[in-house]
Amino acid sequence: MKVTFRVPRFDAATDFTAKYQIYHVEVTPYTTILDALNIIKEEQDSTLAFRRGSQSGIDGSCGMMVNGRNRLASTTRVMGLNATEIALGPLPGFPVIRDLVVDFDSFFAKDAVMLPYLVTDIAKPEDGKERLQSPKDANRIALAATCNQCGCCTSACPVHWSNGEYYGPSALTRAYRFVEDSRDTAIKARLEIVGSETGVWRCHTIFNCSECPKSIPNGENIQALKRKIMLNKIGLGRIEVKVARTEATV
Amino acid sequence: MRQRYTSDVLVIGTGGAGLRAAIELHDQGLKVLLVGKRPKADAHTVLAAGGINAALATVDPEDTWAIHAADTLQEGRMLGDPRMVELLCQQAPQAIAELEAWGMPFARTSTGLIDQRYFGAHRYRRTCFVGDYTGLEIINALMREVERRQIPILERAYISDLLHTGNRVNGAYGFWLADQRQFVIESNAVILATGGHIHIYQRSSSRRRENTGDGMALGLHVGAHLADMELVQFHPSGMIFPHELAGTLVTEAVRGEGGQLYNRHGERFMQRYDAERMELSTRDRVALANYTEIMAGRGSEHGGVWLDISHMPASLIRERLPRMVEQFQAVGVDITREAMQIAPTAHYSMGGLKVDPFSHATNVAGLYAAGEVTAGVHGANRLGGNSLAEILVFGRIAGQHAAEYVRQHSEQPVQAAQIQQAAERLAWASQQAGDFQRSLIDQLQQLVWHGAGVVRNEQTLEASLDQLHTLRSQSQQRSVGPADLAASLDLQSMLLTAEATILAALMRPESRGAHQRSDFPATDPLWQRTIVIKPYRDQTEQLRLELTTELIPTASEDVQAAFNQQEYSVAGRLVE
Ligand SMILES: Cc1cc2nc3c(=O)[nH]c(=O)nc-3n(C[C@H](O)[C@H](O)[C@H](O)COP(=O)(O)OP(=O)(O)OC[C@H]3O[C@@H](n4cnc5c(N)ncnc54)[C@H](O)[C@@H]3O)c2cc1C
Ligand code: SF4
Ligand code: SF4
Ligand code: FES
């Protein structure tokens, strides 16, 4: 089947506005959007710029707008869209560098603010082995931990569009993943970060961000963080409880 | 203007091995720079599914590092280096503890310990895992530590040459994939953590443009030795159709859960290859059986055999093999009702750079290597789950020893002539037409698949060697069209490492593990030797390969005592 792709061409170094270019690609039922872009680049126009990595939905390089929705190009099958014309675009809400490539620097910088690594003062077992964690606690973070920072959620968030300072759902989910980790003890520091001026209270629970390729419920994670901040304010946080529970699971 | 970077140690590769090495170097107080040709969180390691091995003895208290080492050496058909294997098995538990301390969300037992399961031909349950995305979580955990330490990473940056002067390495040269701008990196030592070379095969479980053997080729160009290049692991089951997905793994768990193999006559052919274990036989044997059936004309129209699990209850299949159900659904096959078509696919490079078993130094001063790019651990058949352990243990060890080297050797500034030489190679590559180079890559992959694939013999190998030389001379003629620097350079690395694989396969006159020679079907005890490949330059300055063999040291007494006397079934142990 022949499908028409409409792709904006833009170079931040030289252009003020994007021009649109049309490509025609023969697709099979298995061709993904990214396959189609690869075909265009290799056979029709080597100047077209887009990001690709895993080509299989793993690393989150290929987030882009496909017929009005943020998706991973490498996991979206062309025929699955039931359209013979497909409009592609860069992820909204980020500065465009070239064509479909956006500038993620601010996005990654926000992630870095979340202390995106385990911080803990639970003593390491003396035998040099692992800290304990119950299967239930491990499951609690399993889904949020699969976030590949594709940016589809943050890019879909209307609050982020209007306020570039807002941390956005991806960074907040990252904080959530550590706040919920029974081995982590920097819960207070992280709650302070996400509870700050540019954090969770900016979220108007519009839930645009729930269209995550990994099915991570970002909106709910943010709600959970809000609840946690409130509980902590009134002294019902589970900071102390957490350490106790880690021991209790033995 | 060419960009210039300096560091004490340059680590090439941001897979598990490279990231772990960089963390170690940083913790030793050195200035380290990481470079990868793909996006930073997307090295090949992310594909690893099944898990990572360590004899923690959590679930099976009888397990010890020595038994782990014995299993590894025996399954490797005694071609692994016992010194390296022992070190790996002793230190793997520490690697797990490290990952855990870095927040890896391991699956847990009811008592809160890290859970362990069976994987392939292991005697005990020693594979730790996170769902079916263990590799991805390892990368996530390591990447977080790299960020915590603020170690700089150049991503989507392609290293085209190592810089080498006065018999030691002093940096590297490369370019940005996005805009082809070039850069020089000065560094006192270099660690290659660039992964394997299985992309030389038409069908492989690697993705496009990775595993092109870059590290092995970069090493050869500065005089580093390779070993075990004839030993390539073929996974019994890769998808064959549609061709966009050809090579994509079909997990062994399908066989583990009761999947049966059939040829076009509806015959359950494993009866003829391993009547006792049937589909639950080892990787090399099942791969060989599938291949033989296909070659004998008993395969499917797409060139595969049928793997059928539809006799099991659909609910069980959905519960146990959700990823497979999804993977095939996407191509219109409902595996709860119909059979899958599969064929062997190249999966892992057991050979690679020859390194010192203790320091992971190559024979070139200042050049270290770790991970799939090295040889020594897996012998003639890799055990599932050992490779993730390897990249962590030896990533750290390579980092540690490179750090020591840097402390003992003063810097050797990069000279203009070195840069000139590297820039000339890129200038050459930028005059080659990308289309043409890519078509040569396709041809190379086909000839290697047919000549040095699952089963080889002198005839197929010799023929493929001839074709390879023809391709190489074609690749050097100037062609007209838009350039694709990466494709041109990938091709050169693939040609060189394919040549090494073919030559080594020609030299080994026996069948052992993954190396199957139809003209030498038996294992020859005299060939319990390592084939080593050394590069040299002929009169015309062309790089050539010279092959020799080396004896393999014997295992320590602890490990010898643990050798298994009988072969056992892998039933219930195929996970990945
Ligand atoms: C589908 C699949 C499943 C697997 N499952 C398991 C499993 O369950 N357990 C297990 O133990 N093993 C498994 N493996 C094997 C294991 O994943 C790999 O062997 C291992 O991850 C290799 O890691 P590495 O760090 O050595 O290299 P890689 O992860 O391959 O990283 C190589 C790095 O080098 C970079 N690079 C390469 N060339 C250049 C260049 N010229 N310039 C700049 N950068 C360059 C790449 O960009 C990349 O960052 C599996 C493999 C596959 C394909
Ligand atoms: S939460 Fe989902 S959509 Fe957002 S960055 Fe992570 S994977 Fe992408
Ligand atoms: S729920 Fe919050 S974060 Fe998500 S899109 Fe809405 S405002 Fe943005
Ligand atoms: S290319 Fe990696 S997620 Fe699409």
Image: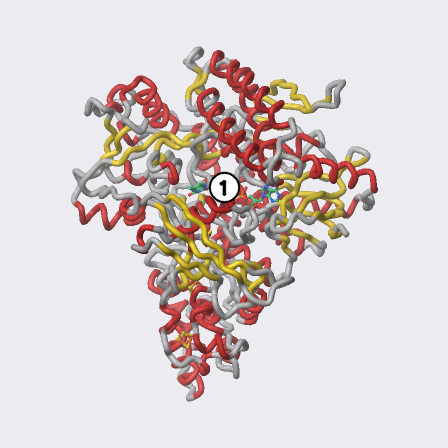
Look at 23% across and 37% down and name the residue there.
Answer: B258
Whether residue A130 is visible here, answered yes or no, is no
Q: Quadrant of ligand 2?
A: bottom left
What residue lies at 16% left-to-right and 38% top-to-bottom?
B311
Please state which of residues B254 and B499 is positioned toward the viewer in this rendering. Answer: B499
Residue B226 against residue B456 in the figure, above or below: below
- Which residue is disc 1 drawn over? A43
| Residue in the foreground of this view, choosing between A234 and B134 | B134
Residue B511 drawn at (x, y percent): 44, 17
Count of labels shown?
A: 1
B347 sits to left or right of B84: left
Q: Picture quarter containing residue B223? A: top right
Q: Is mark 1 on a helix, strand or loop?
A: helix
Type of amino acid at the residue the image marks with label 1: Glu
Q: In which quarter of the image is the N terminus of chain A?
A: top left
Which quadrant of the structure image shows residue B192? top right
- The crowding category of the residue bearing disc 1, from other C-alpha atoms within 10 Å (few below 14, some 14 to 19, many at least 20), is few
Q: Position of residue B41 (x, y in %)?
A: 52, 53
| Res. B49 visible in picture | yes
Residue A88 placement, left or right of B261:
right
Question: Residue A99 at what x, y percent from top left?
Answer: 53, 58
Between B20 and B305, which is closer to the camera in this rendering? B305
